[in-house]
Amino acid sequence: AVLTNPLLNASNTALRVTGRMDTVDWECARSSRDRTRSIGVKICNWGHVAVPEAAKDAYVGLEWTAAFRDVLPRRHPSSPYACDASPEIVAQAGPSWKHSLLYQHRLNNSLCDDKFNPTSGVDAHWSWEVAGPPGDVGFVKGTGGAALHVPVVDTLGGISLHASINGGFIRPITYGGLCPSTTSITDRFYVGGPIQLRGFMHSGIGPRAETGGKSTAGGDALGGDLFYTATVAASIPFPGISLLRDNGMRLFTFANAGTLTGLDATPASAI
């Protein structure tokens, strides 16, 4: 459920109130599902969009969220009282309560020649999230990234070079013992797949358990506290087929790299 109320006449700035109930299936990556029931209040400069990436221009938003989460390990197909998941996932099973404040800023390719298929310009995004009491998880989490698109020659209709880098970290905060000293699998980063790191399966890199459920190849993904991904690419208008070329389709060659790891288990100082 969503309620949006403009704060100024003829302005996109609005107060957005949301309520959400959903279950996300991660059994293919970490033999569990995440059930979430949450309420949130957000003030942003594009109040009518569902996600920041959908804004037509640069996005700035501040959001408060209270979320009740539940990690549900995959059940054994022939023994309903047993779990078909690694011990590490089973140990994380159960409810948690997240109370957080999130700040996001995205340029959304507003400084590029095209929002969806840029060949010239720069882009960037960053966010900060802090969670703590009255919730029972505490952390500070930061993410960010930048991209550069440079046209180099007019040969073959225009060759452009592209480079991007993204990264993030999460650090537990105990608040004097009120919150755990380790991060939850629900809050950690997962890297892999065509959007983040081409050539790898979803959640295909980073810390893993030795075992996993039958639906998880190579052990359950446990997530990490620190990651980066980097990509360099070159593109040209799609050759040979004018219909694709005239509609902005381009042919890419690329190379990417990245990593996902844990941090020292010692939590940050209590706040």
Image (spheres, helix red, strand yellow):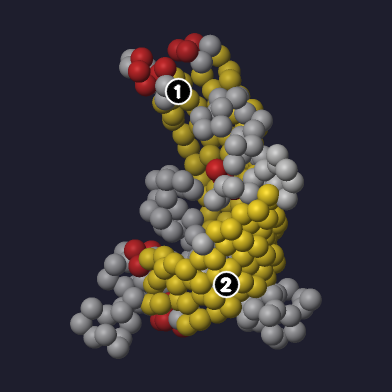
Q: Amino acid at mark 2?
A: Ala
Q: Residues within 10 Å of mark 2 (few under 14, many from 20)?
A: some
Separation of residues labelled 2 and 1 (CA atoms): 41 Å
Q: Amino acid at mark 1?
A: Gly
State the SS at label 2. Answer: strand
Q: Residues within 10 Å of mark 1 (few under 14, many from 20)?
A: some
Q: Depth check: 42 or 160 in front?
A: 42
Give the residue at x 77% y 78%: 270
Above or below 153: residue 119: below
What residue occupies the far left of the structure in this picture? 78
Q: Earlier in the sequence, mark 2 or mark 1?
A: 2
The x and y percentages for residue 141 are 66, 63
Task: Say which residue label 1 marks.
Answer: 248
Observer able to see residue 84: yes
Q: Which mark is residue 233?
A: none
Q: Residue at x 46, y 34 (%)?
A: 254
Q: Is residue 24 above or below residue 158?
A: below
Label 1 SS: loop
In the image, residue 149 lies at what x, y percent?
60, 28
Residue farthest along the bottom direction in this orientation:
81
Is residue 95 placed above or below 64 in the rendered structure? Answer: below
Q: Is residue 114 left or right of residue 174?
A: left
Dividing the picture into quadrants, the one containing residue 64 is bottom right
Residue that mark 2 sits on: 67
